[in-house]
């Protein structure tokens, strides 16, 4: 199965956010390249909120280009076999934490936002950090920091807050 086929199946199976889900599916139906950064009309991206539930905290990255505290994530790559794999790869690369595992049940949320390159139609997952996880900053970040759940609203935008709330509801 191709990444495109996986994305369509994941989105068709996603429950909630019906209007936004349909926008994503229509985008893919109209753009066979709709998963790739080269699609100027927008593209599907994958992200993962790294959570340490035992310590009640999340790891956020201060994005180098956007200069905002965000979850780990970004563009799909040709080697990604599934959206989940893309989210896990992005989470691992940007956090430096090996052994992350996605929360079961598929994506936690969808979030569509305009970025300097195009519209991002983000498929958002949550990833659990293993016990004793040690983060390592990547080239894509200005900073990397753990925040207690109740600190997130003070540093991040509403999309990250909604992702955290939806993720915690699944824990």
Image (spheres, rainbow, N blue to C red):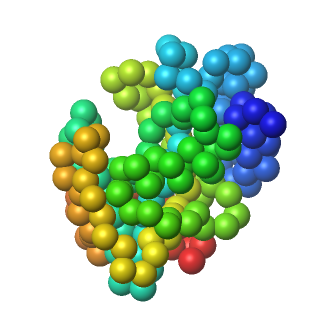
Q: Residue at x 54, y 34 (%)?
A: 76
Give percent across and percent down for residue 149. 34, 73
Report the residue at 70% width, 64% height from top.
105
* Residue 152 in view, yes or no: no
Examine the image and state in which quarter residue 139 appears: top left
Image x and y of residue 30, in percent: 71, 16
Left or right of 145? Residue 92 is right
Identify which residue is drawn at 72% across, 31% down: 4
Number of numbered discs visible in the structure rendering: 0
In the picture shown, does residue 115 fall above or below 13? Answer: above
- Where's residue 88, x and y in %? 53, 53
Q: Quadrant of the N terminus?
A: top right
Q: Is residue 72 above or below residue 129?
A: above
Q: Which residue does the image show at 49% across and 22% down from the upper left? A: 37
Which quadrant holds the C terminus? bottom right
Say which of 85 and 170 sits in front: 85
Q: Position of residue 132 (x, y in %)?
A: 36, 80
* Residue 95, picture quadrant: bottom left
- List the single residue furthest toward the left: 142
Q: Dividing the picture into quarters, in which one does residue 59 lie?
A: bottom left
Q: Which residue appears farthest toward the bottom when viewing the image?
A: 54
Q: Nearer the viewer, residue 170 or 138?
A: 138
Whether residue 93 is visible to the viewer of this picture, yes or no, is: yes
Out of 128 and 92, give the one closest to the viewer: 92
């Amino acid at each position: 199965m191709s990444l495109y086929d996986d994305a369509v199946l994941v989105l068709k199976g996603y429950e909630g956010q019906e209007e936004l889900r349909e926008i994503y599916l229509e985008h893919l139906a109209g753009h066979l390249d709709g998963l790739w950064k080269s699609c100027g009309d927008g593209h599907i991206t994958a992200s993962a909120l790294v959570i340490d539930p035992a310590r009640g905290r999340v790891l956020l990255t201060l994005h180098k280009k956007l200069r905002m505290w965000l979850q780990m994530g970004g563009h799909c790559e040709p080697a990604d076999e599934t959206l989940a794999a893309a989210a896990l790869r992005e989470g691992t690369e940007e956090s430096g934490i090996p052994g992350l595992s996605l929360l079961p049940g598929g994506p936690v949320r969808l979030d569509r936002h305009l970025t300097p390159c195009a519209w991002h139609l983000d498929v958002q997952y949550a990833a659990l950090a293993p016990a004793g996880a040690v983060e390592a900053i990547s080239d894509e970040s200005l900073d990397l920091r753990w925040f207690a759940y109740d600190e997130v609203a003070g540093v991040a935008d509403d999309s990250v807050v909604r992702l955290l709330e939806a993720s915690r509801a699944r824990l």
